[in-house]
Amino acid sequence: MTATRLAPFGTSIFAEMTRLALENQAINLSQGYPDFEGPAPVIERAAEEFRKGQNQYARTMGDPELVSAIAETLLEDQGRVLDPMTDVVVTSGATEGLAASLLGLLNPGDSVVVFEPYYDSYHAGTVLAGAQLRTVPLRHPDFEVDLEALEAALQGARLLLLNTPHNPSGKVFTRSELEDIASLCQQHDVTVLTDEVYEHLAFDGREHISIATLPGMHERSLVVSSAGKTFSFTGWKIGWVTGPKELVAATQAAHQFLTFTVNTPVQRTMAWTLREYREPYFRELRHRFEERRKLLIQELTSCGFEAAPAQGGYFLLTRFAKHSDKSGAEFARELITKHGVAALPVDSFYLSDKSEGHALIRFAFCKSRETILAAGKRLRALRA
């Protein structure tokens, strides 16, 4: 029997839509995973690592080769100075990194501030830690930060959970916005847990900026990253959390009792990948996803949807009012059962005011051209 604290969450919307997609043989544009392989050289390297016989437990905070490669990468790319042995913990994907950080940092009754809409695991992780969520709206279509609302929410809060590039909106927070957020966090002595799994997918010349790189923010920021998202191997479930040793120690305190460690051959593979395969891979990755984003917008627009370009990430928010006055959840289910295409209802990303996402659904463009074109062909039946 499900524990009382988890019962309100039920089955996640991601699991429900994937189940419906499988049952109806739908094209799945609901979840953020590619339907193509990651780089072949990385797969070959992984096969080599598995054959080397290094298949026992790694150091619980991360294999020394990988944590060293992570520290080297962040110094080179962001100018962040990290001790690989104390300032990095490797986790079973970013979701475990988030959960371990929330469990390690929060006490019962603490408050966590999050911008709304938000990835659903933020709420569940907060509740599991015995804390409560406070939301600050990013209002469609511009998703601008309301600094007055943010300051009010930060009063007495323990943690700000930030996400840039943002899921589901695709917003990339600007330097000016992050400076304002950083100033408020310092003023109110709030720690920042920043989810940056789409850090290499800022489009149209935009720059991804980690709030941890701003003055005065290193010592109060934990950054969550995902190798699975970055290199298109989401099934490998490997990520990491970086920051000052005092905060990373809190994440590690929970991590050691959640998964203890992450599989050794994949850690060794990622160490090699970060050192040998980062560039020009990231440039090619951005170009590929900008092209897929453009293609999906074209397909959706031709079907009568209103879709604006995402600034970053994997997803497009799409208005469906021309097709239906139903709720997002009802329309998303209908898309699967009647038209064979899966998307996510955006109202599931809201806590305080679900009407904000009422007429919006989220499509993933981290798919092959063939998948996007096939989905567009099915959706054209909506015009009939």
Image: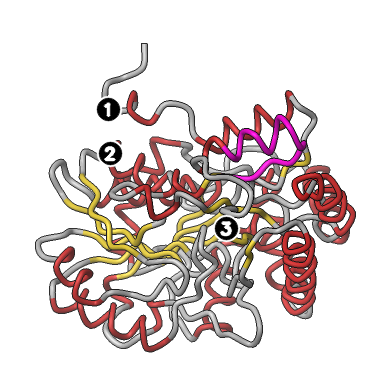
In which quadrant will I find the N terminus?
top left
Position of 315 relative to 361 (above/below): below
Q: Main secondary structure of the magenta part?
A: helix
Q: Closer to the observer: label 1 or label 3? A: 3
Please provide the residue range marked out in magenta: 331-344
Position of 97 relative to 137 (above/below): above
- Secondary structure at badge 2 equals helix
In the image, what residue occupies the spot 57% across and 51% down?
Answer: 361
Callout 2–callout 1 Cβ contact below 8 Å: yes
Circle 2 residues within 10 Å: few <14, some 14–19, many ≥20: some
Left or right: 13 as drawn, with respect to 364: left
> In the rendered structure, which amino acid carries the disc numbered 1?
Arg
Q: Which residue is mark 2?
A: 127
> In this rendering, does residue 72 appear at all?
yes
Callout 1–callout 3 Cβ contact below 8 Å: no
Residue lying at the far top of the rendered structure: 1
- Front residue (pair 72, 115): 115
Tell me which corner region of the image, top left, top right, bottom left or bottom right, holds residue 278.
Answer: bottom right
Circle 1 residues within 10 Å: few <14, some 14–19, many ≥20: few
Left or right: 235 as drawn, with respect to 373: left
- Mark 2 or mark 3: whose residue is earlier in sequence: 2
- Mark 1 or mark 3: whose residue is earlier in sequence: 1
Residue 334 magenta-drawn? yes
Percent across and percent down for residue 2 are 36, 17
Q: Which residue is mark 1?
A: 5
Q: CA distance from mark 2 to mark 3?
A: 31 Å
In the image, what residue occupies the spot 61% across and 33% down?
Answer: 333
